[in-house]
Image (tube, rainbow, N blue to C red):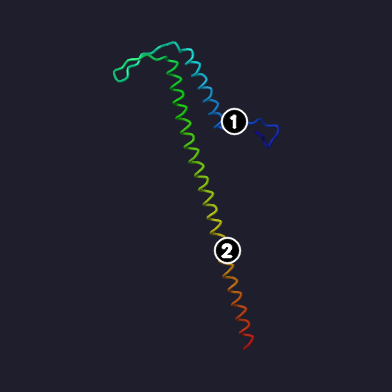
Amino acid sequence: MTDKNPGTKPSLTLGQLVNWLSLAAMVVLVFIALSNWETLIHLRLFNYGFSISLGLMLIVSLVAGSFAGISDYLTLNRGAKQNQIQQRWQAQDVKLAASLTSDREKQLEAKISTLEAALDKALKKQ
């Protein structure tokens, strides 16, 4: 990261801060999962009872949450890119409309000057 002022320290953006906090939370959750790996919890699902490690359950939940977060991020990122492309196209449309208007004005000015020259020529003949 380069700054325009060489004496200033680079600062974290909000996105970078959120990324670092997310990474720290994931590390803490992994340490909690590893320290509770041997703790078993008993669950009942559809009248079927089974035991699962608390650490494994935390890791699976962390992975599932990470996939959900990544998919949300990618969806929002794609939407932002589409908005950016749409704004670019709108700006090009405005430029094209201005160019067409300018060309039309130039054509009309050329026709007016041609008609003025023809009128002057006709008036000189009389």
Q: Is residue 93 left or right of residue 50?
A: right
Taking 52 as reference, is 13 above or below it?
Answer: below
Quarter-of-image position of residue 98: bottom right
Q: CA distance from mark 2 to mark 1?
A: 47 Å
Q: Residue at x 52, y 52 (%)?
A: 90
105 and 38: which is toward the camera: 38
Question: Mark on residue 12?
Answer: 1
Q: Residue at x 44, y 21 (%)?
A: 60
Q: Residue at x 50, y 44 (%)?
A: 82
Q: Regarding mark 1 in the picture, which secondary structure is present there?
A: loop
So how many labels did they put on this image?
2
Rendered location of residue 85, percent (x, y): 52, 46
Which amino acid is tagged 2?
Answer: Ser
Quarter-of-image position of residue 107: bottom right
Q: Regarding mark 2 in the picture, which secondary structure is present there?
A: helix
16 and 53: which is toward the camera: 53
Rendered location of residue 104, percent (x, y): 55, 66
Q: Disc 2 or 1, which lies upstream in sequence? A: 1
Q: Quadrant of the C terminus?
A: bottom right
Taking 39 as reference, is 102 above or below it?
Answer: below
In the displayed orientation, state which residue is furthest to the left. 47
Question: Mark on residue 102?
Answer: 2
51 and 31: which is toward the camera: 51
Rendered location of residue 26, percent (x, y): 50, 22
In the displayed orientation, state which residue is furthest to the top. 38
In the displayed orientation, state which residue is furthest to the bottom. 126
Which amino acid is tagged 1?
Answer: Leu
Taking 45 as reference, is 112 above or below it?
Answer: below
Q: Is residue 58 left or right of residue 49?
A: right
